[in-house]
Image: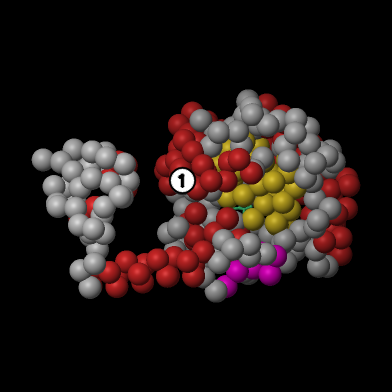
């Protein structure tokens, strides 16, 4: 329940102020209809570069372009009402220099109307986070498993298992918090490490396969809805199996088309209503029922 913020747009300041308070509810979104559905329930919608894998069938997020992120950012912004919308900066759009990051982040903010950007990396990105934050670009940090470093990490692996990696993660989180990140995503990280980081940094942590101690949680929406196929990470809890519903609906449509039961007269312009169509609308589209939603003008 978002008691303090309900009814108004949630800002990055609202998100930052939730440190240690009511857990932040965050999900990914890539489209207008999905943003509309998620918005009433979420504090933050992330237009993640996971769009490359979830929507475009890529193996990693590395091939996602800035233009793709801007297009999906615009779509989500159109559907969002009160949730704070943040857009991922894709691989190659910010790592070169703080100036490159600012140029591309400014495009994202100006062209999508979103509230901030997310970028991956710890201490190595601190200078960039400081550069953007000082110039009016709110930054959501991202430490732990960094999907854009898939090749460098040797795959999608849980982080913070060894002492050295745990120490490095603390250092990374501290560095970007000090640089001005308004919150930090911690991905696929040993629970004790995420818990300690959460206790240590002054900004909210948002866990994805991290720890219930994080100040909020985020997951890929398609994963929790059962729309991502068989292989989902261990940290995903499925809340629905929409794939089965989708299969059933499409099979029913296919069967009706093959049997010439669809379209019925109620779905046609100028067709004579039959007893099947009676009560569900006039066949010329002028009455109540399914055809009242048709906006295309006949003839
Ligand atoms: O791209 C993405 O969706 C993300 C979240 C999984 C945190 O970075």
Q: Is residue 234 magenta?
A: yes
14 to the left or right of 271:
right
Q: Nearer the viewer, residue 87 or 44?
A: 44
Q: Please state which of residues 54 and 154 is positioned toward the viewer in this rendering.
A: 54
| Rendering coords of residue 130 (x, y %) | 70, 33
Pick the residue in front: 273 or 227: 273
Q: Determine if the C-beta at disc 1 is less than 8 A from ligand 1.
A: no
Q: Is residue 8 above or below residue 154?
A: above
Where residue 132 appears, x then y in whole percent? Answer: 63, 32
x 73%, y 41%: residue: 1
Q: Is residue 179 left or right of residue 8?
A: right
Whether residue 221 can be seen here: yes
What span is in magenta? 231-236
Q: Residue furthest left?
A: 299
Using the image, determine if residue 224 lies above or below residue 170.
below
Q: Position of residue 253 (x, y in %)?
A: 32, 66
Main secondary structure found in the magenta portion: loop
The residue sitting at 80% across, 50% down in the picture is 214
**Residue 228 on the magenta span:** no
Callout 1 crowding tier (Cα within 10 Å): few <14, some 14–19, many ≥20: some
Q: Quadrant of the C terminus?
A: top left
Q: Secondary structure at mark 1?
A: helix
Whole-percent x and y of residue 21? 83, 39
Q: Is residue 128 visible?
A: no
Q: Residue at x 69, y 46 (%)?
A: 25
Compared across the picture, whether 291 is left or right of 115 comes to left
The residue sitting at 55% across, 66% down in the picture is 241
| Color theme of the render | secondary structure
Residue under numbered circle 1: 33
């Amino acid at each position: 329940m978002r008691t303090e913020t309900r009814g108004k747009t949630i800002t990055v300041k609202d998100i930052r102020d939730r440190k240690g308070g009511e857990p932040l509810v965050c999900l990914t979104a890539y489209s207008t209809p999905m943003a509309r559905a998620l918005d009433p329930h979420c504090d933050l919608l992330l237009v993640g570069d996971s769009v490359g894998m979830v929507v475009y069938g890529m193996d990693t997020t590395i091939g996602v372009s800035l233009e793709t992120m801007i297009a999906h950012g615009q779509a989500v912004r159109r559907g969002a009402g009160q949730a704070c919308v943040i857009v991922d900066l894709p691989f190659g759009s910010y790592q070169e220099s703080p100036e490159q990051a600012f140029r591309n982040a400014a495009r994202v903010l100006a062209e999508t109307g979103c509230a901030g950007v997310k970028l991956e990396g710890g201490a190595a990105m601190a200078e960039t986070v400081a550069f953007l934050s000082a110039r009016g670009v709110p930054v959501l940090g991202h430490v732990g498993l960094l999907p854009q470093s898939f090749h460098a990490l040797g795959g999608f692996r849980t982080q913070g298992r060894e002492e050295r990696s745990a120490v490095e993660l603390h250092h990374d989180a501290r560095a970007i918090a000090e640089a001005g990140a308004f919150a930090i995503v911690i991905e696929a990280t040993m629970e004790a490490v995420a818990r300690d980081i959460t206790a240590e940094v002054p900004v909210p942590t948002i866990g994805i396969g991290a720890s219930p101690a994080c100040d909020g949680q985020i997951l890929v929406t398609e994963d929790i809805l059962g729309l991502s196929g068989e292989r989902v990470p261990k940290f995903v809890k499925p809340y629905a199996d929409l794939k089965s519903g989708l299969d059933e609906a499409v099979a029913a449509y296919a069967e009706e088309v093959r049997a010439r039961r669809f379209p019925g007269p109620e779905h046609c312009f100028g067709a004579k209503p039959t007893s099947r169509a009676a009560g569900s609308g006039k066949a010329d589209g002028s009455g109540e029922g399914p055809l009242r939603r048709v906006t295309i003008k006949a003839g």
